[in-house]
Image (cartoon, coloured by chain):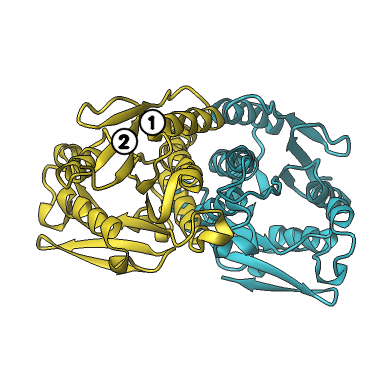
Chain colours: A yellow, B cyan
Amino acid sequence: MSRGRVLVYGGKGALGSAVLEHFKTKGFWTLNVDLTKNDSADANVVVDPTACWINQESHILKEVETLLAGEKLAAILCVAGGWADGKASNADFIKNADLMWKQSVWSSAISARVASSFLAEGGLLQLTGAAAAVEGTPGMLGYGLAKAAVHQLVQSLADPKAAGLPERSSTLAILPVTLDTPMNRKWMAKADFSSWTPLTFVADLLHSWTTDAAKRPNSGSLVKLVTTGGETTLTPQ
Amino acid sequence: MSRGRVLVYGGKGALGSAVLEHFKTKGFWTLNVDLTKNDSADANVVVDPTACWINQESHILKEVETLLAGEKLAAILCVAGGWADGKASNADFIKNADLMWKQSVWSSAISARVASSFLAEGGLLQLTGAAAAVEGTPGMLGYGLAKAAVHQLVQSLADPKAAGLPERSSTLAILPVTLDTPMNRKWMAKADFSSWTPLTFVADLLHSWTTDAAKRPNSGSLVKLVTTGGETTLTPQ
């Protein structure tokens, strides 16, 4: 019997796949929302990357409604995102900023929309920020401003009643420094991996927040994940 | 003889028109970038609102280059923007967030791009944030997250060298509470206008920052404009 239902936005990415697998192992019914299907998921909503923000929203809301058939979600975990650099003099600055906005802000805002209709009372909405974007990020302008928008959205959603979310629901952001993904290992092969946060740590954290509301920081918190010597500590802001 | 050249992004709006007129009075050559022409401006770049961010960028860069014909700008003043509400349960939340993003973030990021090529050394790049978006804005999610993105962009641009901007240039944001515009008087007819910031105050402030670098707060500052009893004070953050 299912322990509950979770939606993983970006559930085909490195972090999303790890999160989805972890919840499956724990007996959850899993719904992946991503640009491609995750065959491990119990259900999938495939997003058309050429559609605009509003059309992506309406497509996802409709599909989620059909797939849930009246059930509610215990958690909406939005781990979609990406990374690109670009200072103001970089010819690709705007192109990269556009991609960062779509990957991080569109997915986060649509997750909030889905939460307003389909998250259970007392449920968890989790979005993904970045530790770097708490301050200025001159070498990666588009990345920083998109993540800063996500941070402010999480603060706006702190009080579920004021923000139009289900009663007693919590909204939290994780703010990783660097996640230990295959892509990061490939591109930063000489880095100190012991300062990178393992995906299993994040998956386990999100599971504990989903199943035990007492383990959650206050709603609206931005939770930095700092890993040193393979040990990760949480710093809610 | 011209005292210098300024670009006003959003120079056909209420604030933009006031700023543009003020600089004209002071002897500046003025360039309006907006969805419609401002006949008071010395030159205009008309933006196609149906074009994507990247096409708006390339169009504006090309037009500005032609119009400046090798000259540089003393200031780029980005006062484009708008307002819309919407909590997560509002059917228009995403539609409004999309509009806020385009009005505030596209214009601000393109202004930074223009600055990297056409702002004079020691020049001023000014963007427009919002005092409310320093914290959560549950009733106006899209507005808040777009303005928060602008705030972080300003912090990213604080150091011109790191951010790819001309030497000794300053980037500053003004964070109004409520501006005393005809639209705001129409929609909030019973409000206390003595707590609204006059457009002439903003125009005069931007002129003083443009002509006297010593009057500017530190580059990267978010400058709240708080008006009480008709008197406006600046609070740089």
- A235 left or right of A143 in image: left
Q: Which residue is mark 1?
A: A67
Q: In terms of image quadrants, where is residue A92?
A: top left
**Extreme residue in the front direction:** A1
Distance from label 2 to label 1 (Cα)?
A: 9 Å
Three-letter code, disc 1: Leu
The N terminus of chain B appears in which quarter of the rendering? top right
| Numbered disc 2: secondary structure | strand
Whether residue B15 is situated above or below residue B132 in the rendered picture: above
Instruction: Give percent across and percent down for residue A160.
Output: 51, 59
Q: Is disc 2 in contact with disc 1, using a CB cutoff of under 8 Å?
A: yes
- In terms of depth relative to the viewer, which is nearer, A236 or A71? A71
**Chain under label 1?**
A
- Within 10 angstroms of label 2, few (less than 14), some, or many (20 or more) residues? many
Q: Which residue is mark 2?
A: A31
Query: Does residue A87 appear in this view?
Result: no
- A134 left or right of B86 in image: left
Instruction: Give percent across and percent down for residue A189.
Output: 12, 42
**What residue is shown at x 65% (from left), y 68% (from top)?**
B224
Whether residue A221 is situated above or below residue B229 in the rendered picture: above
- Report the label total: 2
| Numbered disc 1: secondary structure | helix
**What residue is shown at x 56% (from left), y 52% (from top)?**
B150
Query: Does residue B174 appear in this view?
Result: yes
Residues tagged by mark 2 and mark 1 found on one chain of the structure: yes
Instruction: Give percent across and percent down for residue A172.
Output: 38, 58
